[in-house]
Amino acid sequence: MSITDHFIEDKVTRIPVKKEGQDVKVDFNELKSGGFIKQRQKDLFTVRLRCPGGRLTTKKLIELARIADKYSKKGVVHLSFRQSLEILYVDYRDFDALVADLRNVGHKVASCGPRVRVPIACGGCEYNPNGLTDTQKMAEMVDEKFFGTSTYHKFKMSFSGCPIDCARTREADLGFQGVVEPAWDEDTCTGCTICSRACKEGAIVSHPETGKPIYDPAKCIYCGDCIRACPTESWKAERYGHFVRVGGKHGRHPREANDAAVFIPDEKVSNVIEKTLEWYKINGKKGERIGTTIDRIGLKSYIEFMKNTFSDATIITGV
């Protein structure tokens, strides 16, 4: 027996829609899995659009605004917390026409339900001075290769370009955060002490007599502040990569992601995603987020499974 939501005005769980030329009744949950989310108001839905990395061209934004104005009964959109554009107050009878108009401007409806969702990302290294990795490129890759992949529960990915972590990789089922490993050249160092003042983590302190840096890698978060601050370029980038975190989620029962590996290169990100989904498929259960699977099976199982994939990186110990 289905549960009636008494806050929904029509108080039904199914509605008639046209499907392949025939009148059929479609369940709200089925519509939601396709990106059409039931609102409180009778016959009205929120339509969620795919915006990987929260990025749209200005021309596309103008076209989507016209479509939203055409189909939203109140002429409003909502920018979701995960960077999606949502058209509110859409009558279900307009679904086919709306989807056709979106197709004409080269855009698609997103999806909900137990599958890989649209990835989120910050601006990354393209224009942000703090950015260390090309997060937008990674989000586009995920959207093209993994979007819609069936999983036991929702599966969300995020990409942050630096340790400020605007995209909240600790709250994602699988998160990638940009990092850079600093390397110091003593011969070119003048002992100006600027790097120690730039380091907010206490990973660099200045020698009391020479002023030259004393580096503690255990305290380093690989942000690159020392590299950007050094006037003589004595601090340089040894390597760039991604910090990988797995098993995070927010919501009513939040879970902070486990640190898994650091300095995954760009070309291995796709492999990490593919193998993580494989491990989840083998070990997960229906209705279970990957973080819950890790709690049940153990992080060690995941790390062991990923060892070959993490071969170019540093695996986080202590599991």
Image (tube, rainbow, N blue to C red):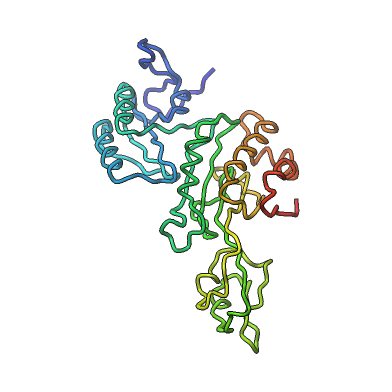
Residue toward you, 266 or 56: 266
Residue lying furthest front: 187
The percent coordinates of residue 22 (x first, y second) are 37, 10
Residue lying furthest bottom: 209
Residue toward you, 185 or 46: 185
Q: Quadrant of the N terminus?
A: top right
The percent coordinates of residue 16 (x first, y second) are 37, 15
Task: Classify residue 87 as left or right of residue 261.
Answer: left
Residue toward you, 152 or 159: 159
The percent coordinates of residue 51 (x first, y second) are 40, 41
User: Which residue is found at the position 33% from the left and 36% from the top?
Assistant: 87
Task: Classify residue 9 as left or right of residue 296.
Answer: left
Task: Classify residue 87 as left or right of residue 303.
Answer: left
Residue toward you, 81 or 229: 229
User: Which residue is found at the position 54% from the left and 79% from the top?
Assistant: 194
Q: Quadrant of residue 157?
A: top right
User: Which residue is found at the position 63% from the left and 34% from the top?
Assistant: 288
Q: Quadrant of residue 216?
A: bottom right
The percent coordinates of residue 219 (x first, y second) are 65, 67
User: Which residue is found at the position 33% from the left and 29% from the top?
Assistant: 103
